[in-house]
Amino acid sequence: MEIRHLVGFIATAEELHFGRAAARLHMAQPALSQQIRQLEKELGVELFHRNTRSVALSEAGHALLGPARQVIVAVDMAKRAAVLGASEIVGRVVIGFAGASSRNVLPLLARAVRAEQPGIELVLQGQTYAGTALAEIVAGQVDIGFCRLPVMNPAIATRIFNYEKLVAALPSDHPLAAQETLNMSDLAAEPFVTFPGNRGSSVRDALVHEALNAGFTPRIMQEAPDSYTILSLVAAGVGVTITVSSVQHIDTPGLVYRQLSGNIPDLAAVLAWRRDNSSPAVQAVLDIAERVLPTPEKAARPNDS
């Protein structure tokens, strides 16, 4: 089994189109088709169901895809180790994040890791909401996730790196926009725009929680996948939203932010990882993160991790 055959298989499995896969690999389509046939002959199985209109993975193809990807990652790590030498930490670290609230902190961490540990390959996986990140951390699909407390799973360790306030975002011509601060109850009759309910968004959970505390169930008019889209919809007059203070850099015409009064707790932003993850590369990234994204002074409590 040749590495190039696995590379061709993975590209075809991801594209489900021989032409697109061949273009992605900068090779001719007949050559790619021949590689796949050679791999199928060697394995004695059919990896794809083909007809004149479509290409689909077979059961054997689905089974091979995960291990094939692992082989390619291992080969890449071996190359890095050979080039950098035995004294360097070599590894692959997947970081899951979502939304505009990671805008400032993620580049700081990524640049520091690349400068200090060139042998570590960072894979930045976007649209990974808090609930999804925690599940993927437990499953070993994500190594480090940007999440928010509470994290109830004892298998996951966390460290606070920021506190975020909840704020209201409204259309600039909304009657409530004339007020400097709002009570949550002021929004009881409003339609809301927020994150999808099936993504494990801590911001959506906080919206529902604070609305219930204020005596109403939020009427969610529309869902959107990220803060930029949500705030654009609010500016367009679709509804209002509750978001976090770290996204107030999004200065959309027709949009205003207003502080919320009352006893509304801040959301603690954390890095989360599996306690039993013994990867030297993951530990190196966590060590760098502790320096470039330090725990806020008021968050330094014994049980934070």
Image (cartoon, rainbow, N blue to C red):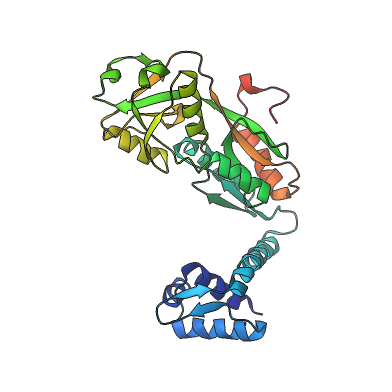
Whether residue 15 is visible, yes or no, is yes
Q: Residue 262 in the image: state x and y as whole percent.
A: 47, 13
Picture quadrant of residue 300: top right
Q: Residue 111 in the image: state x and y as whole percent.
A: 55, 44
Q: Residue at 42% x, 44% y: name it.
A: 225
61 sits to left or right of 187: right
Q: Residue at 64% x, 38% y: name it.
A: 272
153 sits to left or right of 182: right
Q: Nearer the viewer, residue 252 or 56?
A: 56
In the depicted structure, whether residue 288 falls above or below residue 209:
below
**Quadrant of the image for the N terminus?**
bottom right
Q: Residue at 36% x, 21% y: name it.
A: 187
Q: Residue 79 in the image: state x and y as whole percent.
A: 66, 65
**Quadrant of the image for the C terminus?**
top right
231 sits to left or right of 74: left
Q: Residue at 53% x, 50% y: name it.
A: 125
Say how many tags the image has: 0
Whether residue 116 is visible, yes or no, is no
Most extreme residue toward the left is 173
In the depicted structure, whether residue 301 falls above or below residue 252:
above
Q: Residue 40 in the image: state x and y as whole percent.
A: 61, 83
Picture quadrant of residue 297: top right
In the depicted structure, whether residue 259 falls above or below residue 230:
above
Picture quadrant of residue 233: top left
Q: Nearer the viewer, residue 203 or 287?
A: 203
